[in-house]
Image (cartoon, helix red, strand yellow):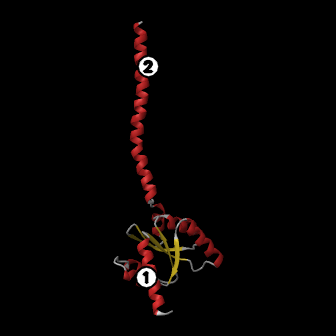
């Protein structure tokens, strides 16, 4: 491979690292062509970009960026594929879904400005809520007190109406 081609690949990887908030490093080497195509289709459905890279080019892309990715260097061995996603837990759920096949195997991740290394971290990543899930939870929590107040006022209104009606009937 020519030096210019390598530099272009490094720049492309660096651009993807800047574009996406989260990325996962995996190993998909043992997948055959059909299973790789199925994995790529599922990634596409979930808006995950799957790219197979050379470890040396990935490390050079890391080094070209302002952020420090040195914690990920030890896992850059063997075959490496990167799963880019703006949804923090989407790749983790996909990897966990295929866990029985042990492919793709999880190496490491950079999620929400934190590093996660090793198989044990995958459980934590699956349980991380995405931004939209968190916003939904917050909205539900904010609506809950308002609904309680409205419900209390409505039930209190009928109760008050009943008491007034009883008192007015008693006077007659």
Residue depicted at x 58% and y 68%: 42
Q: Quadrant of the C terminus?
A: top left
Q: Earlier in the sequence, mark 2 or mark 1?
A: 1
Q: Nearer the viewer, residue 106 or 49?
A: 49
Numbered circle sitting on residue 11: 1
Numbered circle sitting on residue 83: none
Dot 2: what SS?
helix
Rendered location of residue 129, percent (x, y)? 45, 59
Question: Which quadrant of the structure image shows residue 41?
Answer: bottom right
Q: Nearer the viewer, residue 88 or 3?
A: 3
Q: Is residue 36 left or right of residue 18?
A: right
Residue depicted at x 61% and y 75%: 36
Cα–Cα span, label 2 and label 1 = 74 Å
Residue depicted at x 43% and y 30%: 154
Numbered circle sitting on residue 162: 2
Residue 73, compared with residue 168, is above or below; it is below
């Amino acid at each position: 491979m020519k030096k210019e081609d390598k530099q272009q690949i490094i720049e492309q990887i660096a651009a993807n690292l800047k574009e996406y908030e989260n990325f996962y490093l995996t190993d998909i080497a043992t997948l055959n062509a059909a299973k790789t195509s199925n994995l790529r289709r599922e990634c596409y459905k979930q808006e995950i970009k799957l790219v197979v890279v050379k470890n040396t080019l990935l490390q050079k892309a890391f080094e070209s960026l302002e952020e420090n990715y040195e914690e990920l260097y030890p896992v850059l061995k063997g075959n490496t594929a990167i799963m880019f996603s703006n949804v923090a837990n989407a790749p983790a759920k996909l990897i966990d879904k295929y866990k029985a096949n042990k492919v793709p195997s999880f190496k490491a991740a950079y999620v929400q400005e934190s590093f996660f290394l090793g198989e044990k971290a995958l459980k934590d990543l699956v349980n991380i809520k995405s931004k939209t899930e968190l916003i939904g939870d917050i909205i539900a929590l904010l609506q809950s007190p308002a609904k309680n107040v409205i419900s209390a006022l409505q039930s209190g209104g009928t109760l008050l109406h009943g008491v007034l009606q009883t008192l007015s009937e008693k006077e007659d």
